[in-house]
Image (cartoon, rainbow, N blue to C red):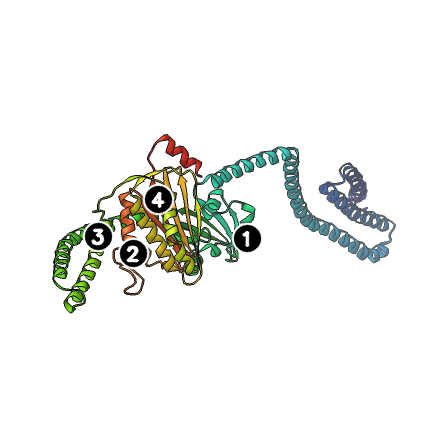
Amino acid sequence: MTGSSYSLAPIWFTDVAGSALIIVLSFLAVWYAVRLAKAQPSNVIWIYLLWLCVALAVFGVSRGVGHIAKRFLLLMDMRDVWISLRSYSGAFNTLAFVVVASITLFFQRIHRINTAILKDKEALEQASQEVMHLNRNLETLVRHRTEELSLSEKKYRRIFEGSMDMIFILDEKGDFVDINRAGLDVLGFQNRDDFIGKVSLGGLFASGEEFDQLMSGLHANGFVRDRQCRLRKSEETEVFLLLSATSRRDASGKIVSYEGIAKDVTARLYMERQLQQAEKLASLGQISTGIAHEINNPLGVMLGYTQLLLRDHPSGSQIHDDLKTIEKHARNCKAVVEDLLKFSRSTQTRKSSIDINQCVGEVISLLEHQFELDKITVETRLSPNLPRVTADGEKLQQVFMNLLMNARQAISGKGRISVGTEGDPGTRAIRVVFSDDGCGIAAEHIDKIFDPFFSTKPVGEGTGLGLSVSYGIVQDHNGRIQVESRPGKGSTFTVVLPVEQDGESASRIEASQ
């Protein structure tokens, strides 16, 4: 080696030793990574580290072997061989480096996936813990919820069944699916099984037009509020209800059910009508009294002078016949005036203790033959042991006569009239009931039938004072007349007479039930 030259031994030694050391350290790294991976096989970091160490070991072997081979070939003066191998060594090093880079890039995706998996694992573990908690406490939770539902069901069922008003649920067709006890009582049904699923609300309405209007309101607005409705309780009885209802729809908007509540206002309406009727008839009675008194005296004078003149003219003469005609019509007018006085309760009433059944029986026996000729059957249901009442027997017979004759005139052809008596312990009164299967009374006439001179009969077949006089007589006995009627089905008139409040009468009324 010349003086200007330096020895390459340190470089040669460092290159060879360093390359050998790289190979040794890389295999040590692989060995340690294998141990870590075996210790925690599910840890993706150790898996990645193992693959990275393997790739780096391949790269280190390629690089180290290349450098060692280079030094030994140059030492053995085999530069030509090294030049021919150098390109292969460089290519192999490049491939090893690409593998290392690929593993690093692939690990980024693996890391993101692993992070997501860990989050999912954490969520699953939390959910698992909650499920385990629910499993451990499921029985207790179910028991508590069941008790809460049971208490809620009992509370609302108690309100439903205990309500004094009618509460009901209908299906989409309008058929009843549930109703409380008060509703069954209002509609006249005893057994729920005979009602649920077998009766529809529309079938109970007395007027189909009223039901159509109710359903139109429910469909248009979803509810109706305080609508007065008239329903049939039985073939002969109607009830008036103040009804509020709502419709329920499903998610598609189709009506699936109706819910409603209704209050029975029949008694209140009847009471209001009776009060209005009483006020109207009281006013008419005062007017009739004045008119009757003003007409009665001139009629008496005319009748007296007519009778005096009849004495002066022989029977058979024209004047005698004319005077008899005047006398006849004067007596008719006087009868009308007397009826007006009876209606206005201005005539004297002679009350005594009478037997109502005997009073009714005498009137029926008087008319029975005539009714048989007219093919009308009279059925009697007289309750025995009724207490005696203090009343004017002749006037009550006139009332019963008027009611029976009206019933007869309401029947065309064959028919049936039912007469019954019964005691009412609740009001301490006796009820005399007259029912017929005649033509009935139109709804627009029902409030006018007790008005003086109101009549639906042809002209000449009645004065229109019969029911007015009957009303006045019953009022004079502190009683009342009730009427129920359905056109085409017949009418029922009920005369209610009070009974003297003593122990014997009360016990006899209760015994008559």
Camera-nearest label, 1 or 3:
3
Find residue 414 and report its horizontal and vertical position in percent: 44, 61
Q: Nearer the viewer, residue 142 or 484?
A: 484
Question: Contact (CB < 8 A) between labels 1 and 3?
Answer: no
Q: Amino acid under label 2? A: Lys
Camera-nearest label, 4 or 1:
4
Q: Residues within 10 Å of mark 2 (few under 14, many from 20)?
A: some
Find residue 163 and report its horizontal and vertical position in percent: 45, 40
Q: Amino acid under label 1? A: Lys
Which residue does the numbered mark 3 point to in the structure image? Answer: 338
Q: Secondary structure at mark 2?
A: loop
Q: Secondary structure at mark 3?
A: helix
Query: Is 328 situated above or below 341?
Result: below
Q: Which of the 4 quarters of the picture holds residue 221?
A: bottom left
Which residue does the numbered mark 4 point to in the structure image? Answer: 496
Q: CA distance from mark 2 to mark 4?
A: 20 Å
Which residue does the numbered mark 1 point to in the structure image? Answer: 198
Q: CA distance from mark 1 to mark 3?
A: 56 Å
Could you tell which of marks 2 and 3 lies nearer the N-terminus? 3
| Extreme residue in the bottom direction | 318
Could you tell which of marks 2 and 4 lies nearer the N-terminus? 2
Could you tell which of marks 1 and 3 lies nearer the N-terminus? 1
Question: Contact (CB < 8 A) between labels 4 and 1?
Answer: no
Query: Is 327 situated above or below 382?
Result: below
Q: Nearer the viewer, residue 485 or 163?
A: 485
Camera-nearest label, 2 or 1:
2
Q: Amino acid under label 3? A: Glu
Q: Secondary structure at mark 4?
A: strand
At horizontal 42% and vertical 38% (from top left) the residue drawn is 385
Residue 448 image label: 2
Q: CA distance from mark 2 to mark 1?
A: 38 Å
Question: Contact (CB < 8 A) between labels 2 and 4?
Answer: no
